[in-house]
Amino acid sequence: MKLIYGTGNPAKLKTMKEMLRDMPVELAGLREAAAAAGAVLPEVDESGKEPLENARIKALAYYHALGQPVFSCDSGLYIDGLTKEEQPGVHVRRVNGRVLTDEEMIRHYTELAKAHGGAVKARYRNAICLVLDEGHVVEYDGDELAGSAFLLVDTPHPARDEGFPLDSISVEIASGNYYMDMQDEHNSVFEEEISAAFRQFFANSLSGLQNIPRKLEQAGK
């Protein structure tokens, strides 16, 4: 089955293709699909407060623009010890209405860690929304799609990975190693954990709506 991945990020498209390589799906990115359909992609207002809301907003917007099955994903950062109002959530890079640079993000989150004793436990939560047609919208944001817990610490690693500033202050709980010192290993484990959940989502979604767990059906009601 042909599906459009609602992202303009080539790296994300490549990663998703690798995750689903053994499944009977053919993925296309937004730009490729829009060019083939002669469609104009909308500017999407990602105004949701949770990853699932933003995934739904994007998937529906792109489906209406392209008229083909589309899925979109979104993620948010959640930190132990913070109130719901204090959580970065989907606004990891936006603080007090301003978008932070990589270095500003590092400063902001190291200060947060310092205020909580030098380290805070955090976790990325992910969500996906698949629009098959007007009557069939399938979505999910369960624990299977969440990454493993890790620590955000108040002492940055000297190295930087452009576009991923929090890796410089992220530490694996089990080993105590910075993500910057174990990037290949960390990425491999993360993708293995998440890819199994994504594959199960698509297997359930495309095998027939009667087989989809009720917790995956909410947006279609």
Image: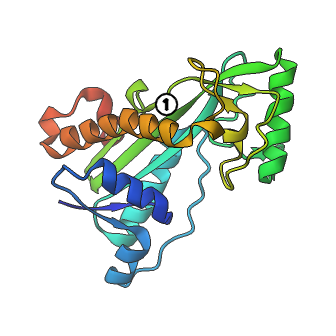
Q: Which residue is drawn at 77% across and 51% down?
A: 102
Left or right of residue 127, residue 177 in this image: right
Give residue 171's quadrant in the image. Answer: top right
**Front-most of 142 and 177?**
177
Q: In this view, does 208 lie to the left or right of 183?
A: left
State the image coordinates of residue 109 (x, y, percent, origin top left).
79, 34
Q: Where is residue 188 in the image (x, y as percent from the top left)?
A: 43, 40
Is 108 drawn above or below residue 133 in the view shown?
above
The quarter of the picture where the N terminus appears is bottom left
Percent of width and height locating residue 198: 32, 40
**Residue appearing at x 20%, y 38% in the figure:** 204
Q: To which residue does mark 1 refer?
A: 147
Asked if residue 136 lies left or right of residue 72, the reply is left
Quadrant containing the C terminus is: top left
At horizontal 62% and vertical 34% (from top left) the residue drawn is 77
Pinpoint residue 55: horizontal percent, then vertical percent. 47, 48
Query: Tell me, what colour scheme is on the image?
Result: rainbow
Q: Which residue lies furthest to the bottom in this view?
A: 38
Placement of 100 over or under 38, stated as above or below: above
